[in-house]
Amino acid sequence: MYKGLSSPNIHTPKNLGEYASIVLHYPMSTLWGGGTFIMTRPDAYPSKTMNAEIIYLGEVEELHRFQRNDRFAEFGAMVTLDEILSTGKTVLPKALTDNIQTIGSRLITRKATIGGTIATKGFTTSFPGTLIVLDATAEVRYMKKKRLHSRWMQITRLLDRNGRISLPSNGLISRVRIAFSEKNCHYFNEIGSFMLDPENAVAAAFTATLDQDILINPRIAFTYPLHGVCYSRDIDSIFSSLRFPLDDEEVDTLESMIFTFIESSFPDITPLQRTRTSGIMRQIIDDLNEKALTVPAEER
């Protein structure tokens, strides 16, 4: 055991008002939802930190709420990934449900929360990238002048310059809103293990509407666990300018342009990550080529 080890102080607010009061008194507290990510980190327990402060969010009822209408689904930050699948699998975008199913077994998805998958520190899960291509928004709660304020923000606006999710000081994601997509192209793939081999893992999410031979509103994001999310509207614009199917030369040119963006943001990705990223990109292009070729000739 560590010398001088002390048990953490656990705070259990019942509502967001109590949460705000606790944060004012203990601004350096760690937020705890399902704890699936925190407990996988080295030296997570027992903690070397003396008198660590933990705010357990599991008893905040409003963070467990789920609602939906004809246009979108809205999940409280404490809604688990398993609950998302069970309540909305038939209507939620396929990229999202595919992403959840790659996270792990039900042992993990029954505990992992949507808020926790977004707001990890020093590590990026595959979830933010998927939410970005789905144009999802989050309600962020933050302290200002000793009061708790709220603001809805697109997930893209939570990315800092380094591709990391960045919240205001003592910020909390309270709700996530995901629109029901009418796009006809949804793709998610993860290669490697984000938890067991984060140095070499990569994930990609892609959505678009393929209208005859062009893409309408394409969005693509690549995620590298130890680096962050690579998302650029410039890459989306490149996809919008293409006419499918692409020939081999066009594919090579597209791949070169995309890697220019990726490596300008994350110059330290490993050779294996680069190879895996290339494989994912070509699989996306192959799928789009196949879809374009199956369009009846009179519609082209």
Image (spheres, helix red, strand yellow):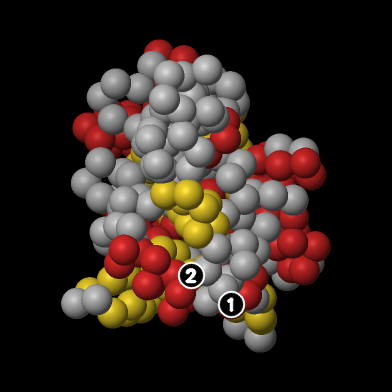
Image quarter where the C terminus lies is bottom right
Looking at the image, residue 61 lies above or below residue 107: below
Q: Which of 84 and 42 is in front in this view?
A: 42
Residue in the foreground of this view, choosing between 196 and 188: 196
Of 189 and 113, nearer the camera is 113
**Relative to 282, residue 62 above or below:** below
Q: What element carries label 1?
A: helix
Classify 168 as above or below 177: above
Give the Cα separation between the discs numbered 1 and 2.
Answer: 8 Å
Does the image show residue 279?
no
* Res. 55 in view: yes
Specify the farthest residue to the top.
Answer: 271
| Numbered disc in front, either 1 or 2 | 1
Disc on res. 249: none
Question: Which residue is depicted at the point 58% across and 77% down?
Answer: 62
Badge 2 density bin: few <14, some 14–19, many ≥20, Cα 10 Å: many
The correct choice, above or below, for 106 with respect to 89 in the image is: above
Residue visible at 37% across and 72% down in the picture: 21
Mark seen at residue 174 = 2
The mark nearer the N terminus, 1 or 2, is 1
Q: Residue drawn 48% across and 43% down?
A: 8
Q: What residue type is labelled 2?
A: Ser
